[in-house]
Image (spheres, helix red, strand yellow):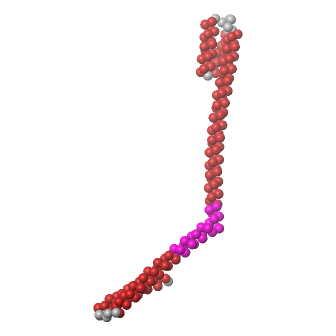
Amino acid sequence: MIIRIALLLIAGAFILMVSADLLTELTLPILPDFITQLAVGLLLSAFALLLTMGLLLIGKQIIQTVDDYFSATQRGQRRVLFIQNEQQRLKRLFHYRAVYINYVHELKKQQLLRRNNRQHLAALSNAIDQDLKALKNTLPKTTLKQLQQENRYYCQQQDSAALVQLQQKIRHDY
């Protein structure tokens, strides 16, 4: 409706401008100036009407959008989305923490195993040393030195199988 009124005002302004142009050719002195000013006024009022209505429609749309944004349903939807995102974040956090805890647990387990293996190897090496000390008087010195060197070498290399074989060799052969 408003657009029709604005278009009618614009059309009326153009008709008045054409009529003012025709009147200037008839050499009427005051009437063409008055009609031209009237046509300009109509044209400006049409554009002002269109601009005012555009601004009012934009304002109305902004108010409606803000009202929708702060409505209870929109707040509820945003709250639900926030809770869903928070749950997903917590699931990811739980997963990554579980992976981290498993990693740390496995690392400590391996460290304990290495430490335990070293202790057992040291105990086995000490047992072999005790066996060699007990056999010190019965073994030749070169054989004793060779067995002690093997014992130290296998202990340094952390070769448990070789240490067990060495212990069995000492107990069975000597």
Q: Residue at x 64, y 37 (%)?
A: 104
Q: Where 69 falls versus 85 (above or below)?
A: below
Q: Is residue 58 magenta?
A: yes
Q: Main secondary structure of the magenta part?
A: helix
Q: Nearer the viewer, residue 64 or 117?
A: 64
Instruction: Find residue 174 and report its horizontal and vertical position in percent.
Output: 67, 9
Q: Where 70 falls versus 26 (above or below)?
A: above
Q: Where 30 falls versus 64 (above or below)?
A: below
Q: Where 135 falls versus 64 (above or below)?
A: above
Q: Nearer the viewer, residue 15 or 31?
A: 31
Instruction: Find residue 9 and report its horizontal and vertical position in percent.
Output: 43, 85
Q: Using the rendered image of the protein, determine whether residue 11 is visible from the camera's viewpoint.
A: no
Residue 112 quadrant: top right
Instruction: Find residue 10 and report its horizontal and vertical position in percent.
Output: 41, 84
Q: Residue at x 65, y 39 (%)?
A: 102
Residue 120 quadrant: top right
Going by the image, does 172 lie left or right of 52? right
Q: Residue at x 62, y 53 (%)?
A: 88
Magenta span: 57-79
Q: Using the rendered image of the protein, determine whether residue 41 is visible from the camera's viewpoint.
A: yes
Instruction: Find residue 119 and report its horizontal and vertical position in percent.
Output: 67, 24
Q: Residue at x 65, y 13 (%)?
A: 169
